[in-house]
Image: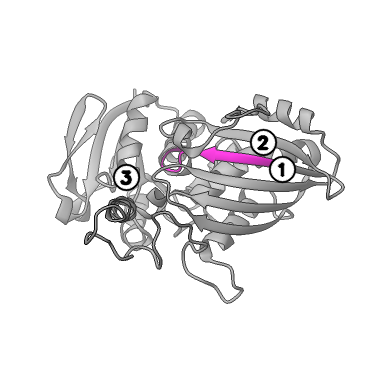
Amino acid sequence: MGYKIAVVGATGNVGHEMLNILAERQFPVDEIVALASRRSLGTEVSFGDTTLTTKDLDTFDFTGWDMALFAVGSDATKQYAPKAAAAGCVVIDNSSLYRYDADIPLIVPEVNPHTIHDYAKKNIIANPNCSTAQMVVALKPLHDRAKIKRVVVSTYQSVSGSGKEAIDELWNQTKGMYVPGQEVDPSVYPKQIAFNVIPHIDVFMDSGDTKEEWKMVAETKKIIDPSIKVTATCVRVPVFVGHSESLNIETEEFLDEDEARDILREAPGLLVVDKREDGGYVTPVECVGDFATFISRIRQDVTVENGLNLWCVSDNLRKGAALNAVQIAELLGREVLKKG
């Protein structure tokens, strides 16, 4: 016996990935529905070898459905997620709306699966920010061994994190560089993204941090340990898919780089590719379409007493969004609902 699953926002990048990953991982589905706004009503999307026609989210009745994977913005989530939850359908939400609600678990299954039972307080589970998700998978096994005190992270985030319009903007600006008269002014981003980097993701806060940087701090504390100090600089780069992060980690106990490498090799969700030679590391182009979070450039930081540096790369549409949501659904099914 399988589950009745709704994918909300099925026509978007993350919604497409959710459908793909549910099929790839052979999630036990008895029935699946693709939901979208009325402007996308009737659009066809793929689920494995099956073609689904989107139905109207506004009029859909979630009664009798087991889980709804939400891949829409916070405004739509605020309107429809409580309706689904009230109808008895467990919501797994990819927006930022519920991440900081104390009564709603924020889950990365490799890191804090024990919090899955907290879903019952509001029938909602939150999916973390894409940049946080891959980072905490790398941090947790090191924290378990040597207790992390502080993390300094710089991100190099692809344009797909901003949606299809951002992908189009990078593509069109790149083409426009080579075709006189076809230059494209920025619209999604405040400055040109092609052949450039922009140290600005989300809105600026009074502290001088951007909201993206604040998210990484708050979510890491909620998912792993509130005592961890995190400081982040988040940068948008001209890459279509795949987020990269440079992590500088300070631990309470000394952790040798070789032991750290062994720990990360054994940790769930991680693949270590760390050779000290040309090409002996993973770049975002190579991680696209993969389930894993890749770790490279593991080395001691001798400028502090107990320091490590590493490089972390992952497909942001997968582990940063759709894959993590599906993994939460798998965990919920395995540990709580137990139908599949």
Residue under label 3, please give it. Answer: 13
Q: Secondary structure at mark 2?
A: strand
Instruction: Check if residue 314 falls in the magenta segment.
Output: yes
Q: What quarter of the picture does the N terminus occupy?
A: top left
CB of mark 1 within 8 Å of CB of mark 2? yes
Q: Is residue 93 left or right of residue 60?
A: right
How far is mark 2 from mark 3, CA to CA?
A: 30 Å
Magenta extent: 309-318
Residue under label 1, please give it. Answer: 309
Mark 3 or 1: the one toward you: 1
Q: Is residue 336 left or right of residue 56?
A: right
Residue under label 2, please give it. Answer: 297
Q: Nearer the viewer, residue 248 or 84?
A: 248
Provide residue 87's location: percent of width, then percent of height: 32, 49
Q: Nearer the viewer, residue 97 or 134?
A: 134
Q: Is residue 128 something that shows in the picture?
A: no
How far is mark 1 from mark 2, CA to CA?
A: 7 Å
Magenta stretch, overall SS: strand
* 140 w.r.t. 39: above or below: above
- Which residue is at 39% across, 62% downward? 192
Provide residue 175's location: percent of width, then percent of height: 28, 51
Circle nearer the N terminus (2, 3): 3
The kind of residue tagged 1 is: Asn
Q: What quarter of the picture does the C terminus occupy?
A: top left
The kind of residue tagged 2 is: Arg
* 210 w.r.t. 52: above or below: below
Q: Secondary structure at mark 3?
A: helix
* 87 w.r.t. 197: above or below: above
Circle nearer the N terminus (3, 1): 3
How far is mark 3 from mark 1, CA to CA?
A: 32 Å
